[in-house]
Image: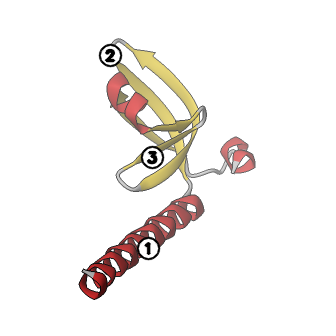
Amino acid sequence: MERALNEDKADLQKMTLSLIELENARVGSNEISLNGKMYDVKSITTKGDFAELLVLEDSEEGALLRRLKELLKEKQQEGALFQLNYKNTFH
């Protein structure tokens, strides 16, 4: 994705976040997660309590993270069912 960030034709988006929102959205030094989407960050310019970001949506990574969350949720539900069956069988 870094190569795509440096291309002139990249579909870069400009967004403004408060510094607190930016800190909460950070996933690494050059990535943020916001509203269920992943973005690679090309640049950040701070102005007072706000940051202007130039970002590129990373839809592939976003899809992978959504699938991972689904799998974790399924496993948690399976674990809850196992505990319920165990409790009903042995107690």
Label 2 CA crowd tier, 10 Å (few <14, some 14–19, many 20+): few
Lower sequence index among marks 3 and 1: 3
| Label 3 element class | strand
Relative placement, left or right, of 12 versus 69 is right
The image position of residue 89, as x and y in percent, is 29, 88
Residue identified by numbered label 1: 75
The type of residue carrying mark 2 is Asp
Label 1 CA crowd tier, 10 Å (few <14, some 14–19, many 20+): few
Give above or below for 67 relative to 90.
Answer: above
In this rendering, which labeled residue sits more in front, label 3 or label 2? 3
Lower sequence index among marks 1 and 2: 2
Per the model, the C-alpha gap separating discs 3 and 2 is 20 Å
Relative placement, left or right, of 18 versus 67 is left
Give above or below for 71 relative to 13.
Answer: below
Residue identified by numbered label 2: 49
The image position of residue 54, as x and y in percent, is 52, 36
Per the model, the C-alpha gap separating discs 3 and 1 is 23 Å
Residue identified by numbered label 3: 33
Circle count:
3
Q: Residue at x 44, y 65 (%)?
A: 69
Q: Residue at x 49, y 70 (%)?
A: 67
